[in-house]
């Protein structure tokens, strides 16, 4: 799994390049994003546009990241496919995560004027 | 189409092979992606459970997977010789638990695998055994696929 990052003003875009985020990559995914949070990034967008599938291990990693970001960084998820969105709904994770349809929506949500 | 069976190394790298095998087996039914995704997710969770809890991520173990179907449903059965799933975890969550408030403080990082399995398939049969555990995941085919 490769992770691409991009900086736009004070927002860090993080894009995992992997069709499947399952237990084989969940720990590495968590550690790489955690390092970005701990580096002091004030706002993060996790872009799932390249991801077709996530499992509960990845959901667990995301919960861990949200807890780590709490009070330090704003965290928004974007570009989830309909099946992944359904999984968030099923596990009620849609009640604690901010989900945006697109990268631009996510940037707008995090921008100071929003 | 006859039943198919594969044996996989009990490590996380097997999960992508397992998903490919499932999707290959299901190709003939021309199913909607949401149907396939939910079965893929249930199977991934069941296999992860074997690797993580059954074999405690120890190397050198294997699990078998058998794909079969009738005119009405697809069944995938996993066989392993690790620690059996505790009976308590084999009970689907009650509806009132689903309505409990979710907050970040109370949110757990784990424990969603079995509930997801129950949510994604129609029937689960777990048979713990002295030498081998069997976990069958059964999902009804949509009418158009019969």
Image (tube, coloured by chain):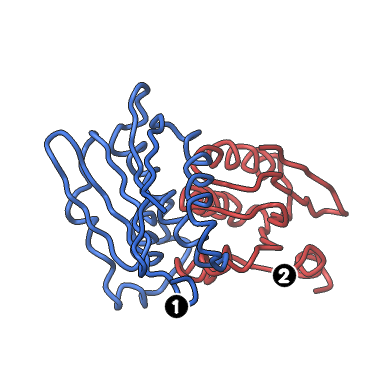
Chain colours: A red, B blue
Quadrant containing the N terminus of chain B in the rendered view: bottom left
Task: Indicate which disc residue A101 carries.
Answer: 2
Residue indicated by mark 1: B143
* Chain letter belonging to callout 2: A
Residue A113 screen position, x and y as percent: 84, 72
Q: Is residue B73 left or right of residue B134?
A: right
- Which quadrant: the C terminus of chain B? bottom left
Figure check: A51 above or below B74: above
Q: Is residue A2 left or right of residue A22?
A: right
Q: Position of residue B43 (x, y in %)?
A: 41, 51
Q: Residue at x 38, y 50 (%)?
A: B2
Q: Is residue B17 visible?
A: yes
**Left-right relation of B46 to A23:** left
Marks counted in the figure total 2
In the image shown, does A18 or A72 lie closer to the viewer? A18
On the same chain, marks 2 and 1? The answer is no
Snapshot quadrant of residue B52:
top left
Residue nearest the viewer, comparing A110 with B129: B129
Contact? badges 2 and 1 (CB < 8 Å): no
- Report helix, strand or loop for mark 1: helix
Residue B73, given in percent of the width and then of the height, sits at 36, 66
Relative to A20, residue A101 above or below: below
Which element is circle 2 on? loop
Q: Give the chain of mark 1.
A: B
Residue A34 location (% of width, % of height): 62, 42
* Residue A96 shows in the view: no
A78 vs B98: above or below: above
Mark 2: few, some, or many residues within 10 Å (few <14, many ≥20)? some
Residue B65: which quarter of the image?
A: top left
**Residue at 49% from the left image edge and 56% from the top image edge:** B26
Q: Which residue: 76% across, 66% down?
A: A102
């Amino acid at each position: 799994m490769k992770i691409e990052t991009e900086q736009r003003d004070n927002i860090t875009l993080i894009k995992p390049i992997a069709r499947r985020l399952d237990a084989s990559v969940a720990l590495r995914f968590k550690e790489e994003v955690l390092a970005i949070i701990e580096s002091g990034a004030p706002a993060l967008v996790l872009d799932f546009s390249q991801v077709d599938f996530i499992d509960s291990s990845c959901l667990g990693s995301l919960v861990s990241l949200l807890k780590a970001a709490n009070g330090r960084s704003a965290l928004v998820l974007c570009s989830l496919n309909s099946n992944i969105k359904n999984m968030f709904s099923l596990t009620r994770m849609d009640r604690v995560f901010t989900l945006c349809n697109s990268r631009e929506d996510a940037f707008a949500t995090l921008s100071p004027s929003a | 189409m006859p039943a198919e069976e594969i044996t996989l190394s009990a490590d996380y790298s097997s999960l992508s092979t397992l998903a490919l095998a499932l999707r290959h087996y299901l190709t003939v039914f021309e199913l909607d992606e949401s149907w396939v995704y939910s079965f893929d997710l249930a199977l991934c969770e069941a296999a992860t459970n074997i690797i993580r809890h059954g074999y405690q991520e120890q190397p050198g173990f294997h699990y078998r997977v058998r794909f079969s179907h009738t005119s009405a449903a697809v069944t995938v059965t996993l066989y392993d010789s690790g620690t059996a799933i505790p009976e308590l975890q084999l009970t689907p969550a009650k509806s009132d638990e689903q309505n409990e408030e979710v907050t970040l403080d109370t949110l757990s990082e784990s424990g969603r695998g079995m509930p997801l399995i129950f949510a994604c398939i129609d029937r689960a049969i777990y048979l713990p055994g002295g030498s081998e555990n069997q976990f069958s995941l059964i999902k009804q085919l949509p009418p158009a696929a019969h």
